Image (cartoon, rainbow, N blue to C red):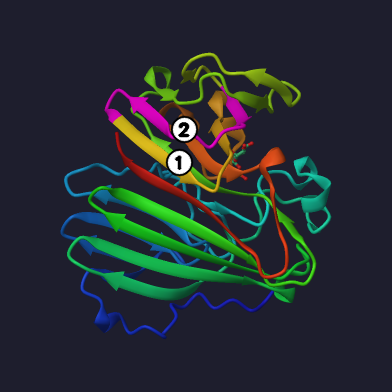
């Protein structure tokens, strides 16, 4: 692995910004956006969005009260970027798996330091871009050459994320990925997810068998599924609804650890499963992507009001 400095890049002087400023949270550097219309906190490590809230709203993202902010450690909550593979390497298609030299889940991008590319601000929006150059520095865990560019656009309407992968190598690049969004709910038992009716899914808790979804998804205990659709989804909780609209995705991961897995999970309170769910905009399972030399693919999500 490359020597990673945890200091903010100096290429863009903070004095240029009106709404965005650096903050150190735990041992990590973060950009905090204090716009009159919304707030956001984005860590340079992992290009990890930890908070987003339009004015007068509580946070639209769930963040663990036990999250730790340390170099090389994934932050529990917000939106981890799973790249350039999603989930257990052993469960990825052979083409994706053959580049992975570790048993670690969800790729290296969520714990790697990203490079700040740009911050743009106006009266309505703040746009922040970061990049990850996946080169031989990562050869201990992954073989390939690729560039990931992620752009966040925050506004009072919501939060838009676009993650573009470009194959900088000479051979075809197969990869899987997810924008692993943790959403809050006051009560998981009174929460439902709409938009997946009639779609097929892999139930990873039932021996990875295929099932068909009938109606909304309800959460009664541990849930861990890969749906074969990238349709717009609505999360309905007792406190309100959010709409997730994706681009470049034909798969969605739906996850809640339930009580037993919650007790085993790192940086996760035992009762945390009652107040969160993950709806992950993905290219997972058979929806993995292959890019020829120089080709790009964009995976994106807009999290907005219903
Ligand atoms: O603990 P992590 O590596 O962050 O993974 C957290 C979860 O991510 C995804 O949603 C997977 O489908 C789950 O099986 C996994 O438990």
- Judge left or right: residue 184 versus residue 146: left
Q: Is residue 282 magenta?
A: no
Most distant residue in the top direction: 214
**Residue at point 75% right, 67% down?**
144
Q: CA distance from mark 1 to mark 2?
A: 6 Å
Residue at the spot of label 2: 277
Residue at the spot of label 1: 182
Query: Which region shows up in magenta?
Result: 222-240
Marker disc for residue 76: none
Question: Within the image, what quadrant is residue 262 found in?
Answer: top right
Are the residues flagged by discs 1 and 2 in contact, CB closer than 8 Å?
yes
- Whether disc 1's CB lies below 8 Å from ligand 1 is answered no
Q: Which quarter shows the C terminus?
A: top left
Residue 236 locus on image (x, y percent): 35, 25
Closer to the N terminus: mark 1 or mark 2?
1
Looking at the rendering, the quadrant in which ligand 1 lies is top right
**Can you see residue 29?**
no
Question: Within the image, what quadrant is residue 15 found in?
Answer: bottom left
Q: Which quarter shows the N terminus?
A: bottom right
Residue 99 locus on image (x, y percent): 80, 59
Q: How packed is label 1: few (under 14 Cα within 10 Å), some, or many (20 or more)?
A: many
Q: Is residue 245 above or below residue 46?
A: above
């Amino acid at each position: 692995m490359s020597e990673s400095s945890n200091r903010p890049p100096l290429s863009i002087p903070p004095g240029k910004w009106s709404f965005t400023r650096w903050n150190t949270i735990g041992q990590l550097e973060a950009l905090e956006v204090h716009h009159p219309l919304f707030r956001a906190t984005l860590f340079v490590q992992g290009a990890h969005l930890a908070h987003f809230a339009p004015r007068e709203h509580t946070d639209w993202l769930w963040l663990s009260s036990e999250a730790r902010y340390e170099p090389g450690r994934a932050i529990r909550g917000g939106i981890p970027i799973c790249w350039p593979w999603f989930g257990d390497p052993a469960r990825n298609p052979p083409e994706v798996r053959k580049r992975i030299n570790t048993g670690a889940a969800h790729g290296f991008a969520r714990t790697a330091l990203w490079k700040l590319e740009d911050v743009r601000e106006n009266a309505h929006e703040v746009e922040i871009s970061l990049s990850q150059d996946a080169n031989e520095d990562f050869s201990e865990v992954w073989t390939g050459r690729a560039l990931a560019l992620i752009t966040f656009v925050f506004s009072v309407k919501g939060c838009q994320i676009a993650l573009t992968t470009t194959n900088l190598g000479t051979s075809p690049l197969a990869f899987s990925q997810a924008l692993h969004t943790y959403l809050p709910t006051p009560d998981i038992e009174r929460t439902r997810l709409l938009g997946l009716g009639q779609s097929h899914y892999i139930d990873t808790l039932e021996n990875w068998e295929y099932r068909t979804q009938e109606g909304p998804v309800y959460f009664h205990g541990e849930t861990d599924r890969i749906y074969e659709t990238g349709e717009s989804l609505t999360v309905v909780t007792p406190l309100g609804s959010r709409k997730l609209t994706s681009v470049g995705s034909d798969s969605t991961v739906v996850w809640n650890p339930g009580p037993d897995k919650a007790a085993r999970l790192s940086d996760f309170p035992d009762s945390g499963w009652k107040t969160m769910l993950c709806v992950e905009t993905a290219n997972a399972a058979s929806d993995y992507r292959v890019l020829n030399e120089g080709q790009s693919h964009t995976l994106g999500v807009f999290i907005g009001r219903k």
